[in-house]
Structures are given as C-alpha cells and as structure tokens.
Amino acid sequence: MHQAQVEAWGSAPRYISVPDLPPPAEDEIRIKVLAAGVHQVVRSRASGKHYTSGTPPHIPGVDGIGETEDGKRVYWFSLDRGCFAEWVNMPKRNIRMLPEGTDPVQAAAVINPALSSWMAFQSRVNLPLPQGFSVLILGATLASGRVAVEIARGFGAGKVVGVARDRGKLGSVEGLDERIVVAEKVEETDFSKFGDVDVILDYVYGPLGAHCLASLMSRKPTSYVHIGMLSGQDLVLPGAVIRSKNLTIRGSGPGSWAMHEMAESIDGLLGLVKRIPKQPIKAAKLEDIETVWGEGVKEGRLVFVP
C-alpha cells in the first residue's frame, strides 16, 4: 500500500510504500480512498503548527470520500488518523453515507470548508434566528466563504452580503444579494449602507473585522462569529464598540463545539452538498504530492485522487 507522509516539519509530504493495513477492527470499516482535499487545516497540521499536529511522521488529511468493500460511497472525518493513502480503516462512528449522485471530488473539496459555516449556524449564533435573517460574510471569495453562501441559504437566510478585496473574484461568487469591496485602506471600507445584520461570519479577522464591527449600524442583536484568520493579524476592538452595540462575539472551531456535535449534525450538511455551486478544483494524483504540494493553487482547492 502507498500513503503520503511528512517525515519532518517543514518538509513536503512524500509518497511512500508502507505495509498493508491490518484487518479492520470490529468497530471499523475499511475504505478505498477516492478523493481527499487539501484544506487549510490539512496544511497547518502538516506543517506542525496546528494544535492537533502531533509528532512526525505525520500522515496528512482530515476527511475524504471513499468506497467501502461492499461498494457504498461514504464520507469520513478524523483528526486522529491521516487519510492521504490508498486505503484507510476508519471507526464506524466517523463514517456517513454519501447521498446518491454526489460528485466525490466536489464533495471532498467543499465539505470541510462548508463545516465552518455549518457549525457556526448549528452552535455559535443566537437562536432562534428571525425569518429571512441577514448574513454578512467577510472573506466571501475564500473557499469557505463561497460555500457559506449556500449554507446560509439552507438555514433560511433571506439576504447574504459578501465582502472581499478582489472585485472580480467577488463578482463571481454565486448567490450574493450585495457585494462590498474592501478598500485599499481597510478602515475606508464602506459598511454604512448595510444596516441591520443578524449574523457576521468572519474568515479574515484583524483590522477588517474590527472596522466592520465599529461601523455596524444594526438595530437588532448581531452574532459575530470568528472562523478564520486570513489577515494573520489579531482583532483589536475598543471597549466602546462592544458597549454601544448589541453584539454577541464567539469563535467557531473544534473546542468551541464538540466533535460529537459535528457528527450528530453532519448528515444535514451532506444533504446540502449537491446544492452548492461547483467550486474550482485542481485534482492531482496522490503519487505526485511531493511536487504539487509546494505549488499552491491560485484558484480553488487541491484534491488528491488515486
């Protein structure tokens, strides 16, 4: 059998030959890997910088699409077992049936990014949300931001506004009602026309998040959920902003919600995957991982296939 392996932090994963897997335990299922995405968390773990990285050697991957030995298409997730391999043995509790007709490569690319907004709505916003609630997405051109549009619609959003720096890319994001282009100087970005907002999903953080909250003119309770940190900077928020607005500030990620909460709700997300517009993807053979890993992908998500 072959798998990808990071032998030392900072080095690219190598495609190596390893002994065949042992027979699956009674509570496991053996899965032939069909597609596995290179998500941000996958790269962070493979660099040794994530709090779940462990120690090398490290097998990358946190989820994927595969086929069981009896021919069933499934999705699995795990922070304990890497999955960039030809075969994996996964605990039954980590496996879900993939709805019929789902494209395995698209699913491998979008389920993990979609989980960020899915779990934000499941557990991190003020409930119940009003009918036809409004959502503001900071970082709407990111993979997670793009799919968050459809996730928000699935939860009942009536208005979705996207925020990003690249006007052209922002224009290509499907399903937005309005678009706000980030100014060259972030603090000059105009949020004044937006008005009431029920939920803010922030994939950027830093100065943009702070400016957005300071500019907020909403007359209703607003749930701000920090999900990503594209800016690489911390958010510095004056106390006056918190005191003068009806804000609930939360983060969304493993730890803010439990893995069993994700497992219990993920079937609902899998049912939405086919509704998400096709996302740009670069598919590559796992055997080419050492070459492709460092190239990066300017558009879309890298997905490894057999």
Image (cartoon, rainbow, N blue to C red):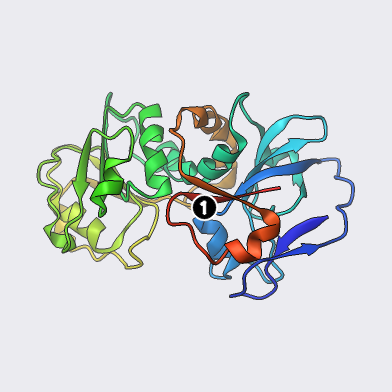
- Determine whether, in the image, residue 306 is placed left or right of residue 265: right
**Residue 42 versus residue 277 in the image, above or below:** below
Which amino acid, by three-letter code, is at mark 1? Pro
**Residue 16 versus residue 24 in the image, above or below:** below
Residue located at (78% from left, 30% from top)? 71
Position of the N terminus by quadrant: bottom right
Residue located at (55% from left, 31% from top)? 270
Q: Residues within 10 Å of mark 1 (few under 14, many from 20)?
A: few
Residue 228 lies in what quarter of the image? bottom left
Secondary structure under tag 1 reads loop
**Residue 110 versus residue 46 in the image, above or below:** above
| Residue 261 visible | no
Residue 235 image position (x, y, % from top left): 28, 64
Residue nearer the viewer, 98 or 126: 98
Residue located at (38% from left, 42% from top)? 146
The residue identified by callout 1 is 254
Residue located at (54% from left, 38% from top)? 106
How many numbered callouts?
A: 1
Residue 269 image position (x, y, % from top left): 51, 33
